[in-house]
Protein backbone atom coordinates (compact mmCIF):
# COMPACT_ATOMS: atom_id res chain seq x y z
CA UNK A 1 0.00 0.00 0.00
CA UNK A 2 1.06 3.59 -0.41
CA UNK A 3 0.16 7.00 0.92
CA UNK A 4 1.24 10.58 0.57
CA UNK A 5 3.46 11.36 3.48
CA UNK A 6 1.38 13.76 5.55
CA UNK A 7 1.30 11.48 8.57
CA UNK A 8 3.38 11.85 11.70
CA UNK A 9 6.51 9.71 11.77
CA UNK A 10 7.36 8.36 15.20
CA UNK A 11 10.38 6.76 13.52
CA UNK A 12 11.99 8.56 10.55
CA UNK A 13 10.87 6.91 7.32
CA UNK A 14 8.01 4.92 8.87
CA UNK A 15 4.58 6.58 8.92
CA UNK A 16 2.42 6.52 12.03
CA UNK A 17 3.29 4.73 15.23
CA UNK A 18 5.47 1.62 14.97
CA UNK A 19 3.52 -1.36 16.37
CA UNK A 20 4.97 -2.93 19.51
CA UNK A 21 5.48 -6.27 17.79
CA UNK A 22 7.42 -4.72 14.90
CA UNK A 23 11.18 -4.18 14.98
CA UNK A 24 13.32 -2.06 12.69
CA UNK A 25 16.14 -4.21 11.31
CA UNK A 26 17.81 -1.73 8.97
CA UNK A 27 17.34 1.82 7.80
CA UNK A 28 19.42 3.65 5.22
CA UNK A 29 19.61 6.12 2.38
CA UNK A 30 20.91 5.98 -1.18
CA UNK A 31 24.29 7.40 -2.11
CA UNK A 32 23.94 10.77 -3.84
CA UNK A 33 26.84 9.88 -6.12
CA UNK A 34 25.24 6.54 -6.90
CA UNK A 35 21.96 8.23 -7.83
CA UNK A 36 23.76 10.79 -10.01
CA UNK A 37 25.75 8.26 -12.02
CA UNK A 38 23.32 5.37 -11.74
CA UNK A 39 19.66 6.32 -11.93
CA UNK A 40 20.38 9.67 -13.60
CA UNK A 41 23.10 8.32 -15.94
CA UNK A 42 25.64 11.04 -15.26
CA UNK A 43 28.31 8.92 -16.91
CA UNK A 44 26.40 8.92 -20.20
CA UNK A 45 26.15 12.71 -20.05
CA UNK A 46 29.93 13.00 -19.67
CA UNK A 47 30.47 10.49 -22.49
CA UNK A 48 28.13 12.42 -24.78
CA UNK A 49 29.94 15.73 -24.31
CA UNK A 50 33.32 14.00 -24.61
CA UNK A 51 32.33 12.46 -27.95
CA UNK A 52 30.96 15.74 -29.27
CA UNK A 53 34.09 17.56 -28.12
CA UNK A 54 36.36 14.98 -29.75
CA UNK A 55 34.38 15.25 -32.99
CA UNK A 56 34.67 19.04 -32.92
CA UNK A 57 38.43 18.97 -32.32
CA UNK A 58 38.99 16.32 -35.00
CA UNK A 59 36.92 18.26 -37.53
CA UNK A 60 38.74 21.52 -36.77
CA UNK A 61 42.14 19.83 -37.02
CA UNK A 62 41.11 18.36 -40.37
CA UNK A 63 40.39 21.88 -41.59
CA UNK A 64 43.88 23.03 -40.60
CA UNK A 65 42.97 24.75 -37.32
CA UNK A 66 45.86 24.57 -34.81
CA UNK A 67 45.24 22.02 -32.05
CA UNK A 68 45.36 24.66 -29.33
CA UNK A 69 42.66 26.73 -30.97
CA UNK A 70 40.57 23.62 -31.61
CA UNK A 71 40.73 22.70 -27.94
CA UNK A 72 39.81 26.23 -26.86
CA UNK A 73 36.77 26.07 -29.11
CA UNK A 74 35.33 23.29 -26.95
CA UNK A 75 35.05 25.46 -23.84
CA UNK A 76 31.32 25.93 -24.35
CA UNK A 77 30.90 22.16 -24.32
CA UNK A 78 32.90 21.93 -21.10
CA UNK A 79 30.68 24.57 -19.49
CA UNK A 80 27.53 22.82 -20.71
CA UNK A 81 28.80 19.48 -19.40
CA UNK A 82 29.62 21.00 -16.03
CA UNK A 83 26.20 22.63 -15.81
CA UNK A 84 24.42 19.38 -16.73
CA UNK A 85 26.41 17.41 -14.16
CA UNK A 86 25.74 20.06 -11.53
CA UNK A 87 22.00 19.75 -12.10
CA UNK A 88 22.14 15.96 -11.94
CA UNK A 89 24.29 16.13 -8.79
CA UNK A 90 21.77 18.46 -7.17
CA UNK A 91 18.93 16.08 -7.98
CA UNK A 92 21.04 13.20 -6.64
CA UNK A 93 21.71 15.08 -3.41
CA UNK A 94 18.04 16.01 -2.98
CA UNK A 95 17.05 12.40 -3.66
CA UNK A 96 19.42 11.22 -0.94
CA UNK A 97 18.14 13.82 1.51
CA UNK A 98 14.48 12.93 0.96
CA UNK A 99 14.76 9.14 0.80
CA UNK A 100 14.74 6.59 3.61
CA UNK A 101 14.66 2.85 3.01
CA UNK A 102 13.58 0.70 5.97
CA UNK A 103 13.43 -3.03 6.59
CA UNK A 104 11.36 -4.13 9.58
CA UNK A 105 10.32 -7.51 10.88
CA UNK A 106 7.01 -7.13 9.00
CA UNK A 107 7.61 -5.00 5.91
CA UNK A 108 9.81 -2.92 3.68
CA UNK A 109 9.08 0.81 3.79
CA UNK A 110 10.23 3.26 1.15
CA UNK A 111 9.81 6.96 1.85
CA UNK A 112 10.88 9.23 -1.00
CA UNK A 113 9.90 12.22 -3.12
CA UNK A 114 11.50 15.64 -3.55
CA UNK A 115 8.44 17.71 -4.42
CA UNK A 116 5.73 15.36 -3.16
CA UNK A 117 6.91 12.98 -0.40
CA UNK A 118 5.36 9.53 -0.60
CA UNK A 119 5.55 6.39 1.50
CA UNK A 120 5.23 2.85 0.15
CA UNK A 121 4.70 -0.08 2.51
CA UNK A 122 5.56 -3.50 1.09
CA UNK A 123 4.60 -6.48 3.27
CA UNK A 124 7.34 -9.10 3.43
CA UNK A 125 4.87 -11.72 2.22
CA UNK A 126 4.51 -9.71 -1.02
CA UNK A 127 8.20 -10.19 -1.91
CA UNK A 128 8.72 -13.25 -4.09
CA UNK A 129 12.39 -12.58 -4.91
CA UNK A 130 14.94 -9.83 -5.30
CA UNK A 131 17.91 -9.02 -7.45
CA UNK A 132 21.12 -7.64 -6.01
CA UNK A 133 23.55 -5.74 -8.25
CA UNK A 134 26.94 -4.51 -7.11
CA UNK A 135 28.02 -1.19 -8.57
CA UNK A 136 31.42 -0.87 -6.90
CA UNK A 137 32.88 -0.10 -3.50
CA UNK A 138 30.34 -2.25 -1.67
CA UNK A 139 27.48 -0.11 -3.00
CA UNK A 140 24.66 -1.58 -5.05
CA UNK A 141 20.98 -1.92 -5.81
CA UNK A 142 18.33 -4.34 -4.54
CA UNK A 143 15.23 -4.69 -6.73
CA UNK A 144 12.18 -6.35 -5.21
CA UNK A 145 10.03 -8.62 -7.35
CA UNK A 146 6.50 -8.72 -5.98
CA UNK A 147 3.87 -11.46 -6.10
CA UNK A 148 1.01 -9.00 -5.66
CA UNK A 149 0.49 -5.57 -7.21
CA UNK A 150 0.73 -2.41 -5.13
CA UNK A 151 -1.46 -0.41 -7.47
CA UNK A 152 1.40 1.91 -8.44
CA UNK A 153 3.00 2.40 -11.84
CA UNK A 154 6.67 2.64 -12.73
CA UNK A 155 6.57 6.43 -12.72
CA UNK A 156 5.42 6.43 -9.07
CA UNK A 157 8.58 4.60 -8.00
CA UNK A 158 11.17 6.28 -10.23
CA UNK A 159 14.06 6.58 -9.63
CA UNK A 160 13.57 3.87 -7.00
CA UNK A 161 12.60 1.23 -9.56
CA UNK A 162 14.39 -1.34 -11.67
CA UNK A 163 14.90 -0.16 -15.23
CA UNK A 164 12.61 -1.37 -18.03
CA UNK A 165 10.16 -3.18 -15.72
CA UNK A 166 7.31 -0.96 -16.90
CA UNK A 167 4.33 -3.33 -16.81
CA UNK A 168 5.30 -4.94 -13.49
CA UNK A 169 7.37 -2.36 -11.59
CA UNK A 170 10.02 -3.63 -9.19
CA UNK A 171 10.67 -1.22 -6.30
CA UNK A 172 14.39 -0.78 -5.73
CA UNK A 173 16.78 0.20 -2.99
CA UNK A 174 19.07 2.43 -5.06
CA UNK A 175 22.79 2.85 -4.47
CA UNK A 176 22.85 1.61 -0.86
CA UNK A 177 26.13 1.07 0.92
CA UNK A 178 27.11 -2.37 2.26
CA UNK A 179 24.48 -3.76 -0.07
CA UNK A 180 25.36 -7.42 0.51
CA UNK A 181 24.78 -6.99 4.25
CA UNK A 182 21.46 -5.29 3.52
CA UNK A 183 20.53 -8.21 1.26
CA UNK A 184 21.28 -10.64 4.07
CA UNK A 185 19.14 -8.59 6.47
CA UNK A 186 16.26 -8.66 3.99
CA UNK A 187 16.63 -12.40 3.53
CA UNK A 188 16.63 -12.93 7.28
CA UNK A 189 13.60 -10.69 7.73
CA UNK A 190 11.51 -12.67 5.25
CA UNK A 191 12.57 -15.98 6.76
CA UNK A 192 11.94 -14.61 10.24
CA UNK A 193 8.43 -13.62 9.22
CA UNK A 194 7.70 -17.30 8.62
CA UNK A 195 7.19 -17.13 4.88
CA UNK A 196 9.21 -20.12 3.66
CA UNK A 197 7.64 -20.10 0.21
CA UNK A 198 9.04 -16.66 -0.54
CA UNK A 199 11.95 -16.43 1.86
CA UNK A 200 14.91 -15.03 -0.10
CA UNK A 201 18.49 -16.15 0.38
CA UNK A 202 21.43 -14.14 -0.90
CA UNK A 203 23.38 -15.92 -3.59
CA UNK A 204 27.09 -16.29 -2.71
CA UNK A 205 27.96 -15.21 -6.25
CA UNK A 206 29.82 -11.90 -6.39
CA UNK A 207 29.23 -9.84 -9.49
CA UNK A 208 31.85 -7.58 -11.08
CA UNK A 209 31.46 -3.83 -11.34
CA UNK A 210 28.51 -2.86 -13.56
CA UNK A 211 27.77 -6.51 -14.32
CA UNK A 212 24.51 -8.36 -13.84
CA UNK A 213 23.24 -8.99 -10.34
CA UNK A 214 23.41 -11.81 -7.87
CA UNK A 215 19.96 -13.19 -7.26
CA UNK A 216 18.18 -12.99 -3.94
CA UNK A 217 15.88 -15.80 -4.94
CA UNK A 218 13.06 -17.73 -3.33
CA UNK A 219 14.31 -20.48 -1.10
Image (cartoon, rainbow, N blue to C red):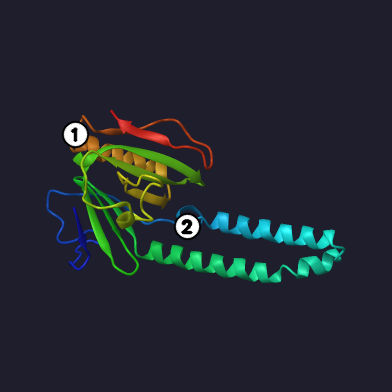
Q: Which residue is mark 2?
A: 40
| Residue 154 seen in the current view | yes
Q: Is residue 162 above or below residue 58?
A: above
| Residue 182 seen in the current view | no
Q: Could you tell me residue 157's position as x and y percent?
A: 32, 55
Q: Could you tell me residue 131's position as x and y percent?
A: 37, 38
CA gap between label 2 and label 1 equals 35 Å
Give the camera-side residue of 122 and 196: 122
Task: Work out whether mark 2 precedes mark 1 in sequence or the reverse, and give the earlier one.
Answer: 2
User: Dot 2, how many residues are within 10 Å of its Cα: few (below 14), some (14-19), or many (20+)?
Assistant: some
Given the current orientation, which residue lies at the most extreme front position? 63
Viewport quadrant of the C terminus? top left
Side (left or right) of 45 relative to 161:
right
Q: Residue, x 17% and y 34% (percent of image)? A: 194
State which mark lies toward you, 2 or 1: 2
Image quarter of residue 217: top left
Q: Residue, x 29% and y 34% (percent of image)? A: 200
Give the camera-side residue of 191 and 211: 211
Q: Which residue is mark 1?
A: 195
SS type, badge 2: loop
SS type, badge 1: loop
Q: Residue, x 53% and y 41% (percent of image)? A: 209
Q: Which mark is residue 119?
A: none
User: Dot 1, how many residues are within 10 Å of its Cα: few (below 14), some (14-19), or many (20+)?
Assistant: some
Amino acid sequence: MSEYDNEHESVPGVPGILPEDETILWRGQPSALGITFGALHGGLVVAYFAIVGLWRVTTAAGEGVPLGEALVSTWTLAVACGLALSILALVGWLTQRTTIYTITSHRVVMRYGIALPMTVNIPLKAISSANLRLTGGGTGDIALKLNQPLGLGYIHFWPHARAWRLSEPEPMFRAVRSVERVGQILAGAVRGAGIPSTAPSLSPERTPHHAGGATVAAA
